[in-house]
Amino acid sequence: MPRPKAKPKRKRRQFNTNRIAALLDKDHTKKSTDSRRSPKKSKTAKPVPRRANPVRAQSIAQPMTMSEIDAIRYQIQQCWSIPAGARDAENLVVRIKVFLNTDGTLAKAPEIVGSNQTGDPFYRTAAESARRAVLKCAPLKNLPVDKYSRWRELTLTFNPREMLGG
């Protein structure tokens, strides 16, 4: 009995990224050649504006992460000392608005915001202590430059109870 002829073995092609790149380049070249053949546009046609880079726009819109916020908080906390001997010191919560440059330096002096206790000498002492902490810690380090629009103006809350772990 004659043996049937064995089918010739096909060579297995290995995946080659260079071939794909060549195909993509070929497709791109074909499109640019086609555009040269298209009829000329009138000189009065307006150029199509380029779209903004979607990755860059997305990074600007991203909020700061908790770890980035905590890093800022930690830096300032290292420079802050709670006023000793103040009456009801753990309840002297101070909010300070900070204006920063892209390099983390202060753009202008920190402002005390949203308080109706400015007449209280203990509150004034706590507020000045918080302001000094911001001035002492400047410039802030390791700020994400791509999120500058998010941290160029910060409102920091100085709460002795949180610092003391209460």
Image: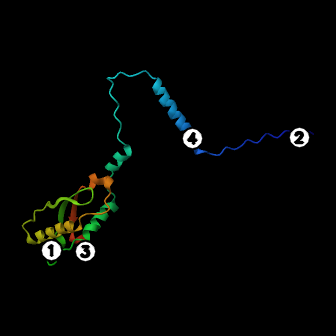
Disc 2 or 3, which lies upstream in sequence?
A: 2
Mark on residue 88?
1
Disc 1 or 3, which lies upstream in sequence?
A: 1
Kind of residue sitting beneath label 4 = Ile
Judge from the rendering whether residue 69 lies leftward or rightward of residue 28; answer left or right. Answer: left
Judge from the rendering whether residue 18 lies leftward or rightward of residue 156; answer left or right. Answer: right
Kind of residue sitting beneath label 1 = Asp
2 or 4: mark nearer the eye? 4
Tag 2 secondary structure: loop
Circle 3: is it few (<14), some (14-19), or many (20+) Cα within 10 Å? few
x and y percent of residue 113 in the render? 15, 60
The residue to which callout 4 is attached is 20
Can the viewer see residue 63? no
The residue to which callout 2 is attached is 3
Quarter holding the C terminus is bottom left
Kind of residue sitting beneath label 3 = Leu
x and y percent of residue 15 in the render? 62, 45
1 or 3: mark nearer the eye? 3
Q: How far is mark 4 from mark 1, CA to CA?
A: 71 Å
Disc 3 or 4, which lies upstream in sequence?
A: 4
Residue positioned 55% across, 41% down in the render: 21
Tag 1 secondary structure: loop
2 or 1: mark nearer the eye? 2
